[in-house]
Amino acid sequence: MKKSMSNYSTWRKLNARNVGTTEEERKTFQRDMPPRRVAVIGAGAAGLMAARELQREGHTPVVFERGAAVGGNWRYDDAPASAEDPLGAAGVDSSLYASLRTNLPRECMGFLDFPFVADAGAGTVSSYSDDPRRYPGHGEVLRYLEAFARRFDLHGLVRLETEVVSVRRDDASTGWKVSYCSRKLAVAGSAEPEVVKEEVFDAVAVCTGTSTEPRVADIAGIDSWPGKQMHSHSYRVPGPFEGQVVVVVGYAPSGVDISRDIVSVAKEVHVARRSLATSGTESTALPNLWLHPMIERAEENGSVVFQDGSRVKADAILHCTGYKYHFPFLGEEFGISVDDNRVGPLYKHVFPPRLAPSISFIGLSLKSLVFPLLQLQSNWVAGVLSGRIVLPSQEGMTEDVSSFYSKLQAKGCPKRHTHDLGECTYEYEDWVAKQCGHEGIEGWRKEMFVAALKNFVHHPESYRDEWEDDHLLSRAHLDFAKYF
Ligand SMILES: Cc1cc2nc3c(=O)[nH]c(=O)nc-3n(C[C@H](O)[C@H](O)[C@H](O)COP(=O)(O)OP(=O)(O)OC[C@H]3O[C@@H](n4cnc5c(N)ncnc54)[C@H](O)[C@@H]3O)c2cc1C
């Protein structure tokens, strides 16, 4: 008892100071913890952070990554999904287009204790920045994640080009049998035989991201519509749409960006947006960009008809309609379903009550401060696995999930928005932080997030280059100084 109390207080001390601890303090702390061997699936931002937090807590993570390098979605792939499957994922993990810049200012986007700043380690080997803009291009985010992996010695934990194909209960232990194969050998039609290997782990953390399986708008008459269709997952550059009439479905950040990317070369761009009742132009600065309500039907003669009766003859429809959660490696025995994009049952978006804590999902929540939340969720999982943090009973967690679903239903929130934190972002993030004994998301970061969202809504053309929240920068940099 005394031992675990001292562990707990050491941990609180470490966590309150985040990375400002000595290696000696960490070693003492880790020696006392019961280590778990944990399979982490995916080496994007979530998997890298999970590996760091698990390792810090004294566990032994092994990270499986089917891609050729770490970084997940931030590893730009200029070969989009194959021409035969422009609406599917077709084995491509990244959804980035060439012109993509972050949709959040770097200061609030980065991990809590590894600042995403332009001058990090300037002049030293740990320097990564090559794009000092506040809303940098995608390459800068990848360099940041690679620097994070270097800084915390994570590369040695990652098995690249290794795809997890199934996770099953291990009959001989209380653990999980993880089957994996070299991704190259798994390619259909390969002359090589597929070699599947198995290993047993105490726990599995699923960090496979939210953008692997494209979701496509259901459009009446689309089967006989003669034009070309594509999902934003496969979009890279505007060139192929030159001189065309393009209908973009969806107006979340990807739809906003891509419609503007294309409008520079297309004849006309027509955006179908759920929240609109009537059609109109977006702004006088973009005379060939129109906004419409959703599509009612597509016709054999090439027309696309919107719900207000307006119509255009279009060459292409680009679905910027988001993604579906997809966990092909989890068998039915898990009892985890994806129902209208609700992954469940999951306690607080992370733990399936029946399998907690040895199975967890990190990074399912959307519309949040993604990187900071990945850090808090990873910390929570690592702490629960070592017994430092205690979960409610299985019944308690199941009741919590049921009451959460009832509240969503009473608010009229569709199942597919279950993991959209939206206005509950801070409440949830602060709740997870509290479980971890962490002081939570900094005030300046919350204010910056709100300011950035408002700026995006009111100034979609210019929000990445003009802002009014400079006063928050000095507060951010004051905090960052703790970590250098
Ligand atoms: C177009 C786009 C723009 C975005 N812009 C921003 C932004 O500006 N700011 C922001 O904060 N967030 C943004 N996001 C959100 C983004 O998803 C997160 O920033 C972050 O990349 C999520 O990391 P992740 O590790 O959860 O998922 P991912 O980065 O998708 O990583 C998942 C990893 O799992 C691997 N994997 C999957 N299945 C298996 C398997 N069976 N076996 C082994 N490996 C597997 C994949 O190869 C991948 O490397 C954007 C997302 C998209 C799609």
Image (cartoon, grey):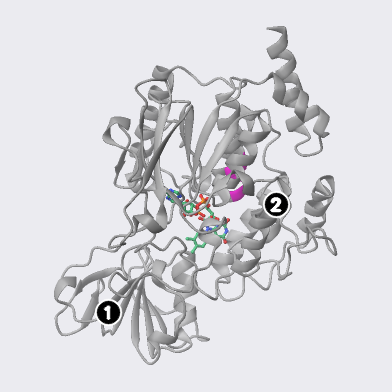
Q: Is residue 373 magenta?
A: yes
- In this rendering, would 6 be left or right of 226? right
Q: Is residue 2 above or below residue 64?
A: above
Is 25 located above or below residue 266 in the figure?
A: above
Camera-nearest label, 1 or 2: 2
In the current view of this chain or complex, which residue is farthest to the front? Answer: 192
Query: How far across and down, in percent of the image, does residue 203 sit?
Result: 48, 30
Specify the amino acid type for callout 2: Arg
Q: Position of residue 175 (x, y in %)?
A: 43, 25
Q: Main secondary structure of the magenta part?
A: helix
Residue at which label 1 appears: 228
- Name the disc covering residue 321, or none: none
Residue farthest toward the top in the current orientation of the protein: 1
Q: Residue at x 16, y 72 (%)?
A: 223
Residue 344 or residue 159, whichever sits in front: 159
Q: CA distance from mark 1 to mark 2?
A: 43 Å
Residue 356 place in picture, x, y as percent:
45, 25
Q: Which residue is depicted at the point 49% across and 79% down?
A: 260
Q: Amino acid at mark 1?
A: Lys
Give the magenta range.
Answer: 371-375
Q: Mark 2 highlights which residue?
A: 150
